Structure formats: C-alpha cells, structure tokens
DNA sequence: CAAATAGTTTACGTTAACGTAAAGGTAAGG
DNA sequence: CCTTACCTTTACGTTAACGTAAACTATTTG
C-alpha cells in the first residue's frame, strides 16, 4: 500500500508540483486526501508515469487521457469496446509513423556525426 | 530545378499556408520571391519536411531549427563541430528514450486490444 | 469584364500547459 | 516560540504555434 506525497512524485519524475496539480485540475489525476493534503496511491503514480510518457511522445494531455482510459475497467459497453479498438488502431498507426520518423532521424544524425568527425580530422589540428 | 507554390506545399504536407508563412516568420524557411510571391525550391521543401517530421516527434520549432542546421554546410569552426557532436548525442539519447516509450506503448496497446476483444467475445452477443 | 482563385501583409485572437506570485495552514526541531 | 519545510488555494501571467479576419493585388476563366 505505497503512498506518495506530491513532492516525492515531483522529485521522482522531475516535474514541478504545479504540474502535478495541473493534471488534477484537468481531471487526469484524483489523489486521495488526508485532511487537505494530497495522498497519491501506487495507481496514481502509474497514471502520472503514463502521462509523462505520453508527453515525451509529443501527445497532448487529452490524447494521454484517452490512452490511459483504455487501461481502465468498467468498459463493459460493447460499443465502447469497438470504439476503443478503433482508437487503439489509430494510436498504433501514429506510433508506427513515429517509429519511422525516429529511425530516419537517427540515420540522419549518424550521417551528420560522421560528417562532423570527418571535418574535424581534416580541419581540426589547424 | 523543381519549384513549388505555397499552396502546393500546403496540400502536399497537409498544413495551412499560414503555418508555412509562420515558419518563415521565425526564420525556419526563406523561400525566394518572384515579385511578391513566394517560390519554394526543392531544398525549401526538404526543410519543411524536416520541420514537420520534428513536429510529429514532439520537437519544438526551435529544436527542429537546431537539428536542421546540423545538415547545413559552413560549419567549419572546430568548436562549432564539437558542440554539434554533443547536440547530436543529446538528440540520440532523447530519441532512444522515445523508442523505448513507443515499444512500451505498443505493448500496452496490444494488451488493451486483446482485453477488448476478449471482453467482446464473452460479453458481446448480449 | 466580372467573378473566381491564389497570392500578399498586418495584426489581433486563441489554446495548451504550465509559471509565478500572493496569502495562508500545519507540523517538527532547536 | 519561532523558523524551516512542507502543504494548500486562488488567480493572473506567459510562451509556442498557429487561427482568423481584414484589406488588398494579380491572374485566369466562363
């Protein structure tokens, strides 16, 4: 039954407390309260982790909300499920595009680097 | 000697002309002019393509500017080259992190999907 | 030749994702 | 008891990346 304070999470994931509270404001997190103080569960921590992963991938917070909600239970409605499968497919398409972009960029970076090093060799010891 | 109008590029890459002009405003593109009208070269088109790839990867336009400038010539200064190699390494680190994130997300999506389909089978024909 | 189409500049508006400041409550330690 | 270190809410400010509208020019086409 792990519990976390807002500053603990803030340090662990290197974001400000303001950011974490912001995610709560827009309904991405709903930590428990001890009195007035926020108390984050392990599940809350995972959600935050997922949000930040989404951010690294360039997703909007709304996109992240959609993705995160995919993991939630209570999706018993059949239509909902079908919509979910579509959403998953859409995400997959986008991610594959990103994979493509990244491999290309890495290729470019390698090229740029060897160019640099080459230029350093011939040009370096002036 | 390929040439493109702003609306051609706009259609090809599915962005507004406003967006393309915006990239010029902040110095990411500098197309030639025929009279008052912008005329984009093949090189301009490539730059735009790189900018948009950066966007898909969640880079800011400033980040993209840095990356794109790596491909440019005139980087004869040794210190510049060393800084460039560092920048390339930093980019590589970030991209590898993204690769990691994406494979994890794809894993999660697969899981979510099989869960969905499973739920549809047992639950579907009400 | 009038209307549609594509181009231009200028400039204010908008949204997301927080930053930052103000003002205050609570609990531990010297 | 007072400072230090947390926590809180409220609320206005900021930045990036365009959107949107106005007002105008140039070219093509029925």
Image (tube, coloured by chain):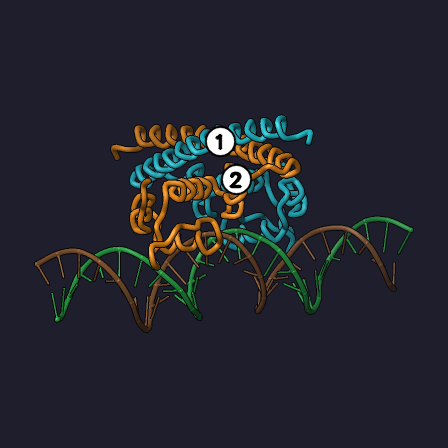
Chain colours: A cyan, B orange, C green, D brown
Residue shown at 34%/44% (left/top)? B13
Q: Are marks 1 and 2 on the same chain?
A: no
- Residue C11 versus residue B75: which sits nearer the camera? B75
Dot 2 falls on which chain? Answer: B
Image coordinates for residue C13, horizontal then vertical, percent: 42, 68
Tell me if residue C11 comes above or below residue A37 in the rendering.
Answer: below
Q: Residues within 10 Å of mark 2 (few under 14, many from 20)?
A: many
Classify mark 2: helix, strand or loop: helix
For the question of whether residue A75 can be seen, the reply is: yes
Residue on which disc 1 sits: A108
Any part of residue A47 in sight: no
Name which residue lies at 31% across and 43% down. Answer: B12
Vertical placement of residue B23 versus A57, above or below: below
- Along the horizontal axis of the image, is C3 left or right of A71? left
Quarter of the figure with residue A12:
top right
Q: In the figure, is residue A69 to the left or right of C27? A: left
Q: Position of residue B77 (x, y in %)?
A: 63, 38
**Tag 1 subunit:** A
């Amino acid at each position: 039954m792990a519990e976390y304070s807002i500053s603990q999470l803030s340090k662990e994931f290197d974001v400000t407390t303001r950011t974490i509270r912001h995610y709560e404001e827009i309904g991405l997190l709903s930590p428990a309260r001890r009195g007035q103080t926020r108390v984050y569960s392990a599940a809350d921590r995972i959600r935050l982790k997922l949000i930040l992963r989404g951010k690294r991938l360039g997703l909007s917070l709304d996109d992240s909300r959609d993705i995160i909600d995919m993991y939630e239970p209570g999706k018993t409605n059949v239509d909902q499920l079908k919509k979910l499968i579509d959403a998953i497919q859409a995400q997959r398409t986008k991610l594959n595009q990103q994979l493509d972009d990244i491999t290309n960029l890495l290729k470019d970076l390698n090229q740029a680097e060897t160019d640099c090093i080459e230029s350093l060799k011939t040009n370096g010891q002036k």
